[in-house]
Amino acid sequence: MHGYELITELEARSSGRWRPSPGSIYPALTRLEEQGLLTAEELDEKKVFSLTARGREAREALDVDGAVPTPDRWRETGEGDGALRALPAEIAGQARQLRRFGSPDQVEKAAALLEDVKRQLYAILASGPTRD
């Protein structure tokens, strides 16, 4: 992958909760390349990174046989609020797509919908906490 693909992949895997900046991803890729864990080659005027044999060994060393699988930190929510964590990120991504590619009518409809959702969320907060 090239750097921008890595950025978007990390954003997708984190359900939009983390999008590293080019100012952080490219220096990290350079350091990994200097350590011999990655190689870089120019393809279609883009620098594409691949794991080296040493990089694959380092990745495999993170997986210990018989160990409990590493938890998926992107999915952990801690309090049963997974949907409340993931949905805003998904909605933000869709809003970006609408701003970029939507017609003026679609953008207007989306903005009205989001204004309504915002009012409803404030109404939920205003009603105070409830006991289950």
Image: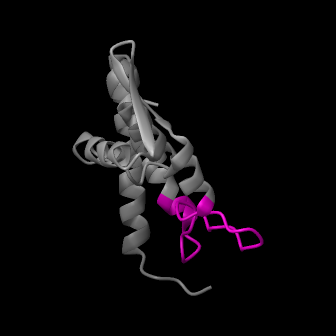
Q: Residue at x 72, y 73 (%)?
A: 67
Indicate whether 51 appears above or below 59: above
Q: Nearer the viewer, residue 112 or 73?
A: 73
Percent position of residue 41, x then y: 40, 24
Q: Residue furthest bottom?
A: 131
**Image vertical order of residue 17 relative to residue 42, above or below:** below
Residue 132 sits above or below residue 78 on the image: below
The image shows residue 57 at horizontal and vertical percentages of 59, 53
Q: Residue furthest right?
A: 66
Which region is colored magenta? Answer: 61-85
Q: Position of residue 75 (x, y in %)?
A: 57, 62
* Residue at (38, 53) in percent of width and height: 18
Tell me if 39 is positioned left or right of 82 in this view.
Answer: left
Residue at 63 percent of width and 56 percent of height: 60
* Quadrant of the image containing the C terminus: bottom right
The residue most toward the left is 23
- The one nearer the camera, 127 or 53, is 53
Q: Residue, x 36% and y 34% (percent of image)? A: 3
SS assignment for the magenta stretch, majority: loop
Residue 2 seen in render? yes
Q: Is residue 67 magenta?
A: yes
